[in-house]
Structures are given as structure tokens and as C-alpha cells.
Image: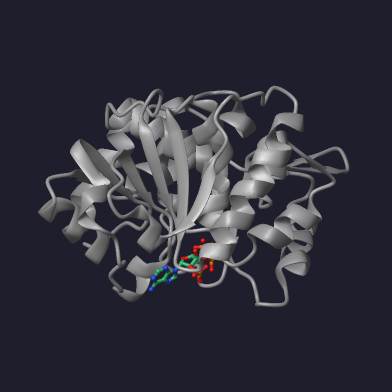
Amino acid sequence: MTDRYAVFGNPIGHSKSPRIHSLFAAQTGQDISYQAILAGKEGFVAAVHAFIAASDGLARGANVTVPFKEEAFRLATRRTPRAEAAGAVNTLSFEAGAVIGDNTDGAGLIRDLKNNLGCDPAGRRVLLLGAGGAARGAILPLLLEGPAELVIANRTEETAARLALEFANSFTRLPGCAVDVKPDGMGFPDLAGRQFDLVINATSAGLSSAALPLPTSVFALRCVAYEMVYGRETPFMAQARANGARVADGLGMLVEQAAEAFFIWRGVRPHTEPVLAALRSTS
Ligand code: ATR
């Protein structure tokens, strides 16, 4: 009996998740199927229920991508602390009438930074660009790594300030989430003269090839610049490179968040290195 999984999104045609999970399954000898499902903009919940109903009791879980992560959060009957902190769910597990919601994006980012890029956020000055869903998911996982500081900078300063305050006031109340550093929120102009060892672009600017008005000073010596977008050279990557930073795109985060979901579902942690290499060789 083959356990069934799916990824829901809109659009979904170019999703790499089915390939990643089938490579994980082959590597670990797990008997699963994993399909991409295009849900209508208003049809996410119905699509999940249809998938479960059509699976003869074998639907075990799902990934959720843009634009349904907030809806998946509401669909979940139980949520992990990191999903609560992210305000979004990218991994669902179907268990005896319960729908458990988790968020593996932040863990994927941290694993990619530490294991694949040799960049441990501990003790580093970290700058997170953006204050939307992608940035929100990264905040708690970054704080738990014990950075020297975490600054959230956004085009709309007020959103960054609000997000920083929200985390400063609330994350310590989550189980196992006592951390020392409180994030600071600001606008891009406030970054003038400040330096960071790790700069993470969680804005969606790269998707429209828009440049960010960043002061060049933000890239400290030996800075790592991380772009969450993958598959293209964004203006942020070009700017970081021009200022001497070591640059990474978000493909590793994609593979690592998938590995974390696979681990939640199957109890086995796949090796990500060959999968990442396979994706890089064909992209
Ligand atoms: P996501 O889920 O990808 O984070 P989102 O919630 O819509 O998407 O958030 C998009 C983020 O990218 C926001 O922080 C947005 O800044 P604003 O809050 O000022 O809108 C940021 N962003 C998008 N396009 C941008 C651009 N051209 N320059 C700077 N920031 C941009």
C-alpha cells in the first residue's frame, strides 16, 4: 500500500517538490507517491478534502505553497510552535481525523546555512530583508540560533517595526523558545553605516527583478548574502557580489525544507546533498 502525499499551490506547474520527494523516497526506500495539485484560488480547502477522499485512507500529508500557506494554517486542527510563530503552514500531516500543521521553511533555511554553506548564524550580525510571509517564517528559527543581533528591514518601515515588536513581545511565550536577542525593525535608509555578517533577502523583489535600495555598507567583510529566490540571478545577488559578499540562492532552502517535511512524515532524514546536486545540474 503506497502512502500518498501532494503539494498544493497556484501556480504549481513548475514545482520541484514532486522530483525532490521522489528522489528522497528512492534514496531511503520509502514507498510513497507525491503529486502536484493545482488548486483554484478559492478552492484550496476543497482540493485538500478531495485529495484525502480520493486516497482510500492512504493520504498521509501535503506540502502547501504560495498562495495557500495562511489558509493551511487555518485548516490545521493542531499546529507546532514554529508554525504558530510563522503564522503559516507549509507541511500538513493527516493523522486519524486530525490535520497537523507545521512550517519547515525556517528550519530549511537554517540547515542550508549551517550544513551546506558553513554559515552558522550564532554570534553573527544578521539582517533580514522583508516583512512579509517569507520573512516571518525565518525570524524565530534565526533567533533560536543565537545571533549577535537580528535586524528586520523593510521597504515599508512600519511593517518591519510591527513585526519586530510582535516577536519581541510574543516568541518567549512559545514552548522551548526562550531566546535572548530581540529583533529590531527599521526601513532601508536606517541601515546606513551599519554592517552585517549575514544578509538574507526575504523580499519578493527578486521575482520582479527589482533592486533594493540598500546602503552598500551593509555587507561586512566575509559577509554571506542569502537570496530566498532561486533559479535566477537577482539584483540583490548582483549587488551583494559587487560588494564582496559570498552569495547563495534559495535552492538549498527548498531542498532542506522538503527534507524536514519528509522527516516529519516518514521518520527518516534523507541526504540532501545528492538531491541538491541533481537539481543544480538540471536547472
Ligand atoms: P512573501 O510571502 O513572499 O514574503 P509578501 O507577504 O507579499 O510575500 O511580502 C513581500 C515582501 O517583499 C514585503 O516585505 C515587501 O515590502 P513591503 O512590505 O514594503 O510591501 C517586499 N517587497 C516586494 N517588492 C519589493 C521591492 N520592489 N522592493 C522592496 N521590497 C519589496
**Residue 26 falls left or right of residue 62:** left
- 187 vs 212, nearest the viewer: 187
Task: Give the quarter of the image for residue 2.
Answer: top right
**Residue 75 falls left or right of residue 253:** right
- 254 vs 196, nearest the viewer: 196
- Residue 276 appears anywhere in the view: yes
- 212 vs 65, nearest the viewer: 212
Q: Looking at the figure, which quarter contains the C terminus?
A: bottom left
**Residue 242 falls left or right of residue 169:** left
Residue for point 22% across, 50% down: 217
- Residue 92 appears anywhere in the view: no
Q: Looking at the figure, which quarter contains the N terminus?
A: top right
In the rendered view, would you say 274 is above or below 269? below
Please provide percent x and percent y for residue 29.
48, 27
In the rendered view, would you say 177 is above or below 46? above
Residue for point 31% across, 66% down: 212
Q: Count how many numbered circles sit on residues in the image.
A: 0
Please provide percent x and percent y for residue 104.
56, 40
Task: Point out the residue furthest to the right here.
Answer: 97
In the rendered view, would you say 109 is above or below 67? above
Please provide percent x and percent y for residue 211.
28, 70
Residue for point 41% across, 23% down: 122
Colour mapping used in the image: one colour
Please provide percent x and percent y for residue 36.
54, 60
- 253 vs 96, nearest the viewer: 253
